[in-house]
Image: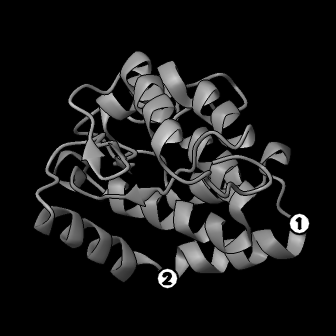
Amino acid sequence: MYEDVACAHCLEFEKAGATQLDEDVKANLAQVRFHPLSILDRLSTTSYSTRAADAALCASDAGVNQFVVYHNLLFGNDLKGKQIQPPENSAGPSNTLLVAYAQYKSVGMSAAQVTTFTTCVTSKQHYALVAAITDRASQRGISVTPTVIVNGRTLKTNDLKTLEAAIVAADATGPAPAPSAGGR
């Protein structure tokens, strides 16, 4: 799954299908590989796509479960109920807020993991990786987000019904996925 956290269509996709996809992963029906892209930095005054993708990868350093919860949070709401994804042509949440989100109890990071996460975000530890993932996606012809590929086939439409049908077809013909313990 290729997503940009600043992508409005990705937000729609996540709102429509994240819960079901998480359930499919936990039921060993699907496996998800996330490719966080930064193709929408041009629509942010502070390179939010790169900063948020970097933060998500910093969360993955703490663990798969922390990544999944943090990823879902970036497409969700903060503790006050405000949508985290910023409108286009805005700054987006600051790095201070990206770090604060990692401290949410639901993310499940220990104090030591939050300290490591903070250093990771402030040092821009995964910026080069985000750029490499984005470049590689571009080389593969991926220019829009979300782009969902199931068993090597790009879905023509990104809706829950199409995704579920692709998962069922893949389960019928391919090997069983090996999901993480906590979800996507």
| Applied colour scheme | one colour
Dividing the picture into quadrants, the one containing residue 39 is: bottom left
Relative horizontal placement of residue 160, taking residue 19 as reference (left or right): left
Q: Amino acid at mark 2?
A: Gln
Q: x and y percent of residue 101 in the render?
A: 68, 49
Tell me how many marks there are: 2
Residue sitting nearer the eye, 126 or 99 = 126
Q: x and y percent of residue 78 in the render?
A: 65, 33
Q: Residue at x 31, y 70 (%)?
A: 133
Mark 2: secondary structure: loop
Q: Residue at x 64, y 34 (%)?
A: 24
Mark 2: few, some, or many residues within 10 Å (few <14, many ≥20)?
A: some
Residue lying furthest front in this view? 173
Residue sitting nearer the eye, 139 or 47 = 139
Marks 2 and 1, the one that precedes in the sequence: 1
Q: Residue at x 38, y 78 (%)?
A: 129
Relative horizontal placement of residue 6, taking residue 76 as reference (left or right): left
Report which residue position mark 1 lands on: 110
Q: x and y percent of residue 150 in the render?
A: 38, 45
Report which residue position mark 2 lands on: 125
Q: x and y percent of residue 179 in the render?
A: 68, 54
Relative horizontal placement of residue 178, taking residue 151 as reference (left or right): right
Q: Amino acid at mark 1?
A: Ser
Mark 1: few, some, or many residues within 10 Å (few <14, many ≥20)?
A: few
Above or below, comparing residue 74 to residue 139 in the picture: above
Residue sitting nearer the eye, 62 or 164 = 164
Relative horizontal placement of residue 58, taking residue 1 as reference (left or right): right
Dividing the picture into quadrants, the one containing residue 79 is: top right
Above or below, comparing residue 183 to residue 78 in the picture: below
Measure the alpha-carbon separation of dots 2 and 1: 20 Å
Mark 1: secondary structure: loop
